[in-house]
Image (cartoon, rainbow, N blue to C red):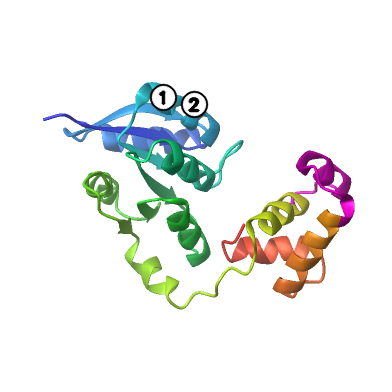
Amino acid sequence: MSKIKVLLAEDQGMVRGALAALLGIETDIEVVGSVSNGQEAFRAMAKARPDVVVTDIEMPEMTGLELAARVRELYPETRVVIVTTFARPGYLRRALEAGASGYLLKDRPSAELADAVRRVHRGMRVVDPDLAAEIWNAEPDPLTDREREILRRAGEGEATAELAKSLRLSEGTVRNYLSEAISKLGAANRIEAARMARAKGWL
């Protein structure tokens, strides 16, 4: 019987090593790659051709959510499992919208990861049970994709002029997006808006 090929994407080396070790002891799973960010994972897809990608959310260069969306678009036969510390319904909702088939928290028993890999490989969806219950009562994300991107980058300290140049927008348009996001969140400024949105899992 052929093994389930898994590609790991995790920016913390110790965690990445632990995940590789946990999956490596399973007789029906083979770790075919282990990388430190989403961009590296996406580049590795063509060569590794994994059945399942196991990825964190917050990583440099490309987030796990962005990676999931790219994989769904270009490698629809590959399943994605998010493994993260973020127990927030907002993140779960965005992960499912991006095409992830699984969403597990890092504090779950280690055996659940291998089981999740097997289940998503069979076409099933695996979601942390406690978080799945919360999503039904979660506040809906009011931000558009463009508002989310601009607010995230502004919250990280990027100036309006820099944002306008990189996004090929006018500074006035960037300010309008920020103003709309701040208003939707009921925040006093862009920094507070970014903090509030991140706390809810919307950034």
Helix, strand or loop for disc 2:
helix
Q: Is residue 197 left or right of residue 173?
A: left
Q: Position of residue 178 (x, y in %)?
A: 79, 61
Relative to 95, residue 31 above or below: above
Q: Is residue 166 magenta?
A: yes
Q: Position of residue 71 (x, y in %)?
A: 44, 39
Real-space CA distance between mark 1 and mark 2, rounded to the nearest whole angstrom: 7 Å
Q: Is residue 55 visible?
A: no
As drawn, the residue found furthest toward the left would be: 1
Find residue 43 and name its label.
2
Q: Amino acid at mark 1?
A: Ala
Find residue 107 and name its label.
none
| Residue at mark 1 | 46
Residue 79, picture quadrant: top left
Segment tinted magenta in the rendering: 156-172
Q: Is residue 143 left or right of residue 12?
A: right
